[in-house]
Image: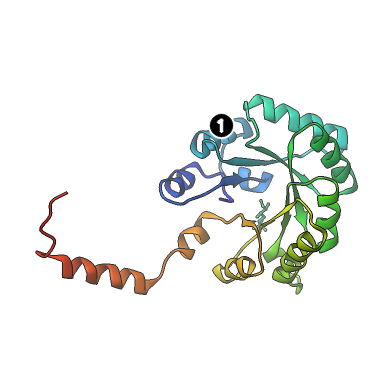
Amino acid sequence: MADTANLDELRELYSFFPLEGVTTNPTILSHSGRKLSESIQGIQEIAGTGMVHIQMISADSEDMVREAKKYRSYFDFGDNFYAKIPVTAKGYRAMRILKDAGINVTATAIFTQQQALVAMKAGADFVAPYVSRLDNISSHGIEVVGDIVQNIATYGLKGKVLAASFKTVDQIYRVSMAGSHSATINAELLFQLIKHPMTDIGVKQFEADAEGLYDISF
Ligand code: E4P
């Protein structure tokens, strides 16, 4: 998924990248220069039937639930909508209520395997461990992702890992090898992870060698 609310970036990414959705948080939205209503409407137009994850800002469980229901109806989201809920005590309670109401949940701001496990038991569809933020406090983001993946397999849980907070392509490589079911990645890294200079050199050479050789018009 694309971890950005920049509509220009999203338009370009969606023109070729096989994305499954867009994730936002208040910080990401604040960089877009647009209010929530305008931002999400723009994202929805670009993402089409893909998932859109919006973070709740309420502090209390019932308010988070009200907030999620409001956004879901305001933007006329069906099942494409995911309410991002931080893994606080109030958040866990809101997750259960939202799941019982048939609303998709992404548990966010996860820093430990235990938080993810509790969130999945509370019904979260996705759990989002923050890889870079873990690495930056001398912890191990990739290991946390791997532990959660292992828990899902061991206990047959329904949740999926949505690895988040990346600063390097190598982190993305490592979470994919650790079995993360999905990842949300900023535009700069999405562009970077598909690039390789040898690919560019190879393509240039093929173009040169095809000159005057391909005689079937199309
Ligand atoms: C996911 O949606 C998270 O909110 C996001 O990836 C956090 O990224 P950051 O640590 O770069 O702010």
Q: Position of residue 112 (x, y in %)?
A: 81, 63
Q: Residue at x 9, y 64 (%)?
A: 212
The residue lying toward the viewer, choosing from 125 and 143, is 125
For the rendered model, the colour scheme is rainbow
The reply to whether residue 87 is visible in this rendering is no
- Crowdedness of circle 1 by 10 Å Cα count: few (<14), some, many (20+)? some
Q: Residue at x 57, y 69 (%)?
A: 173
The reply to whether residue 217 is visible in this rendering is yes
Q: Position of residue 143 (x, y in %)?
A: 73, 71
Q: Is residue 153 above or below residue 25?
A: below
Quarter-of-image position of residue 75? top right
> Would you say 149 lies left or right of 80 here?
right
Q: Position of residue 145 (x, y in %)?
A: 72, 65
Q: What is the secondary structure assignment of the residue under circle 1?
A: helix
**Mark 1 lies on residue:** 41
Q: Is residue 86 above or below residue 189?
A: above
Q: Position of residue 209 (x, y in %)?
A: 17, 70
The residue lying toward the viewer, choosing from 210 and 113, is 210
